[in-house]
Image: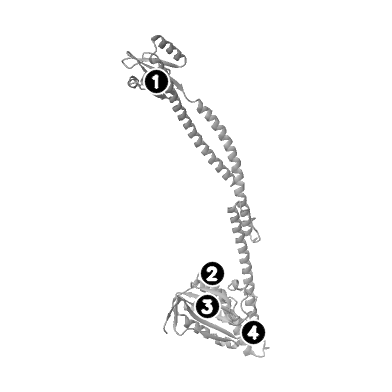
Amino acid sequence: MRRRLTIAVVALVAGALVVAGLGTLLLIRRSARDETRHELVRQATAIADRADGASAANLAVLRRAMQLEGAVVVAIGPGGLTRDPLPSGVTAADLDVERLRAGEVVVGSRGKLVFAAAPVVRPRAVLAVVLTQRVGGGERRAGVYLLLTGAASLTVAALVAGWLAVRVTRPLATAEAATRRIAEGDLAARVPVPDDSDPEAASLARSINTMAATLARSQGLERQFLMSVSHDLRTPLTSIRGFAEAISDGTATDPSRAARVIAAEARRLERLVGDLLDLAKLDAKQFSFHPRPVDVCEVVRETAEGFERSAEDAGVTIDVRVPDHALVADVDPDRLAQVVANLVENGLKFAVSRIEVSATPDGDGAVIAVTDDGPGIPAEDRPRVFERLYQATRAPARQVGSGLGLAIVAELVAAMGGRVDAVSGDDGGSRFAVTLSGASSSSA
């Protein structure tokens, strides 16, 4: 890349020099030709003025003197032809006899030869002072000068292009080496961030470093996720295996209780596998949604009532507070019920004695809130409570569910166009609020 960049810059400078040089030579040639014409016209006119009243003897002397200087005085006959030799390169056709007879100065050029003819009108004849001069010496000098300056410019351009290529490609080479290490699994690789004199390279380095840090964090979360899932799978499997072996060996003192434990742990495994499948479908954008107008209050009430038995066994009261009128929103009722169920299940983990489930209108939307009287959510946990299997610093009062419920809630609510927030309750505990848009109230 360095070689290509250097060649491109040098070629660009060379092309610009060629165009500028040709343009300069053309301007020099045109300027020299115009200047020569003006000077010849001036000289021819001055000589013609002096010859206007000169005697025949003086005119003959003038002719001889001009011929020594490369100029002539010619006489124009009645037929328009000159009766005297013309300067080399000028023909009789080049002299406009009618204009000379009218007293005008005739000027022209043939190649590099420039000529000017000034008339001397006499009673019986018309004389013409013809001067010639070749142009082109200045072009040669300019061409040599342009070649020298062009060579110097190309040398400087090559040096600057080499320096620029190194400056541009060095950060790219460093970034390429770091990204290769990251691709090979070294997520600790980082790109040195240059100073602010090169903002683009600094921005690229920061972006790569942010990507590496994000990948490292994702890898850590994935490792923690797998460890947590493995633990959650191993615990019920251990219980199932132990009680099953006890029943099989006949060592179980209470086979009925052992069967109940096996059934409960199997349901726990089933719930965990179901949650994992839900997350996989959400990640693959394959989760099915069938939104339709739904009474949010009815979904909240029925879902919360389904947990009354579990809450009673845990010594927790579930208080459902919804308005008497319908609160209609365009959502998938099954997915909304799943959201409410996961929030209530999460509340059962931490509640001491009471869980409140409510649905209230909020402008053109609705808010579903689940509040428990547990230890509350520490400030450092709030931004991460919806991460998969994130281990909060607060200890649950009881183990309920798979540990993936809040992650599924966040995914489902986002898919339905809503928002979920986690805050500490007014009287302690925690409050999870789901905001749904497009809800309307109607009489029951």
Circles 2 and 1, Cβ within 8 Å, touching? The answer is no
Q: Is residue 13 visible?
A: yes
User: Which of the numbered marks, if any, corresponds to residue 117?
Assistant: 1
**Disc 4: which residue:** 244
Decide if residue 236 is on the left or right side of residue 323.
Answer: right
Q: Nearer the viewer, mark 2 or mark 3?
A: 3
N-term-proximal mark, 4 vs 2: 4
Q: Nearer the viewer, mark 4 or mark 3?
A: 3
Considering the numbered disc 4 on the image, is that residue within a helix, a strand or a loop? helix
Whole-percent x, y for residue 408 in the image = 55, 74
Q: Nearer the viewer, mark 2 or mark 1?
A: 1
**Disc 3: which residue:** 339
Considering the numbered disc 3 on the image, is that residue within a helix, a strand or a loop? helix
| Mark 3 nearby-residue class (10 Å; few <14, some 14–19, many ≥20) | many
| Mark 1 nearby-residue class (10 Å; few <14, some 14–19, many ≥20) | many
Q: Taking 265 as reference, is 413 above or below it? A: above
Residue extending farthest to the front is 53
Mark 2–mark 1 distance (CA, rounded to whole Å)? 94 Å
Q: Taking 375 as reference, is 10 above or below it? A: above
Considering the numbered disc 2 on the image, is that residue within a helix, a strand or a loop? helix
Circles 2 and 3, Cβ within 8 Å, touching? The answer is no
Q: Which of 138/111 is in front?
A: 138
**Disc 2: which residue:** 283
Mark 3–mark 1 distance (CA, rounded to whole Å)? 105 Å
Residue displayed at 65% across by 90% down:
254
